[in-house]
Amino acid sequence: MSGVNYSEKIPNNVNLVGDRTLQRALEHWQPHFIEWWKGMGPSDFQSADVYLRTATSVDAQGWATYGTVKMPDYRWGIFLADQQAGRTIGFGDQMGQPVWQQVPGEYRSTLRRLIVTQGDTEPASVEQQRLLGHTCPSLYDLRNLFQINVEEGRHLWAMVYLLHAYFGRDGREEAEELLARHSGDADKPRILTTFNEPISDWLSLFCFTYFTDRDGKYQLKSLAESAFDPLSRTCRFMLTEEAHHMFVGETGLGRVTKRTLEVMKEIGSDDPARVRAAGAVDLPTLQKYLNFWCSSSLDLFGSEISSNSAANFANGLKGRPDESQYEDHVLREKTLTLAVPAGDETVPMLNALNEVMRESYLKDCEIGLKRWNRQIERAGFSTRLTLPSSRFRRTIGAWAGQPVTPEGKLLDKTTYEKQLHEWIPSESDRAFVHSLMRKVTEPGKMAAWIAPPERGINNLPVEYEYVKLH
Ligand code: BYC
């Protein structure tokens, strides 16, 4: 069951050949996807040979096969985790009933909306990152960028499969729209705010993969709990790929920190101007990038108090990540007290689930911070990196537009606006970071602002030529 059929035009483990209508519809969408990839995917590297992993089965042991591939020839396909016999709904008002193999009519538009929103982020991220190859700090990093990009392309396929297979004509139209909206486009932007932010330097890429891909992990985990079984199975497999994306973020930021500390030791100073002059990212600038991408990603959980989240949970469409770790899966009796600008507000727990998820996400984000701070401490410096408060720089929810410091303190608007450039990258900070971005493509060599990784990919040495440029 879990083996992937690669002899078909669209590799899949869903027996596509057994449903000619669906197969034809997806084969019709396929060239539109390739056209989008060539126009909006990584610019200028389409003929490079890239050392990539491709899914060949969905079991934990053998799902990734490594080989050299030109990106437009990557075998994007449809892979669902194996069906679990007798799976029942794990939360909400219909808990214990069998999961659904088809979309119930009453939840059709909500499920479609959730799938479209999830699907929209995948090509958006590829668009955001399309120019980064031109300033790669090493071939190792270039390969990781492309690995992420092709997998985000596959995640788009995952959502497009669901739209085509379960939502009829509306689904097919939505699948076309997923290729028509573009990140940052003034007329047809991507749906969620973070996916319209430019990612024009590698520090932003590492922050994005650390913070925003981690939102992906949380959202996919909560959709993996869904009573709509095909959505659950799709998300379960996507999560196996997501782990590498966050690895790139965590190790990338760790390597930037390491290099900065080496420079600080060499020059015997933590003076940001001197660190910059020596060609590394000073820690205050790193902190500003963390503040920017963390606060943007916090918006992706939606409003603190949300009737959408209540309905999605009660109806079994979207659970909490790792739902089985909780005792109460219905939540009809519980409340939560939340701090909003007007004071404390007690609301039904069902309406506060976005906030519950945001809080556990923030805890998960702490892991990297602890590691980087240990590096700083060991190097003998007193600076500590921190996460901003979940109220800082919000554009969605109760704290949207509130003048709050990264520590969570309310300020008057004028002072806040004057000080904002001290908390998130200013134009000149961005210009400085951009000035460091020079392409390094000699195997094993690294740009001066980043330390080498501890090991290469799939047991290969760091010096391996991960991308052969022509
Ligand atoms: N920007 O009740 P509300 C990933 C909209 S990342 C713009 O506050 P709700 C990845 C919301 O859509 C994971 N609009 O929140 C990472 C709603 O609009 P409608 C992506 C926003 O609905 C890296 C309205 O505000 N997956 O995979 O409880 C690389 C009121 O909504 C935003 C998902 O997000 C925003 N930040 O929750 C590649 C999962 N926030 O419907 C990939 C699917 C809210 O009234 N999506 N709005 O027109 C969802 O579960 C929910 O839509 C949200 C919002 C969690 C996003």
Image: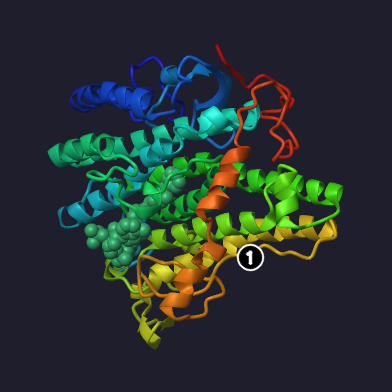
Q: Is mark 1 within 8 Å of ligand 1?
A: no
Work out which residue is located at the far top of the displayed protein and give it.
Answer: 470
Picture quadrant of residue 94: bottom left
Pointer 1 residue: 386
Amino acid beneath label 1: Thr
Per the image, label 1 sits on a secondary structure element best described as loop
Q: Looking at the picture, does residue 95 appear above or below residue 204?
A: below
Q: Looking at the picture, does residue 150 appear above or below residue 400?
A: above
Q: Position of residue 406 (x, y in %)?
A: 54, 70
Q: How is the image coloured?
A: rainbow
Q: Looking at the picture, does residue 253 appear above or below residue 20?
A: below
Q: Nearer the viewer, residue 100 or 416?
A: 416
Seen at 34% across and 74% down, the residue is 305
Q: Looking at the picture, does residue 429 appear above or below residue 10?
A: below
Quadrant (top left, top right, bottom left, bottom right) of the C terminus: top right
Q: Nearer the viewer, residue 78 or 448?
A: 448
Q: Position of residue 263 (x, y in %)?
A: 79, 46
Q: Position of residue 32 (x, y in %)?
A: 26, 25
Horizontally, is 115 left or right of 368 in the view? left
Camera sees residue 452: yes
Seen at 29% across and 42% down, the residue is 185
Seen at 73% across and 25% down, the residue is 444
Quadrant (top left, top right, bottom left, bottom right) of the N terminus: top left
Q: Residues within 10 Å of mark 1 (few under 14, many from 20)?
A: some
Q: Position of residue 335 (x, y in %)?
A: 39, 83
Work out which residue is located at the far bottom of the displayed protein and give it.
Answer: 343
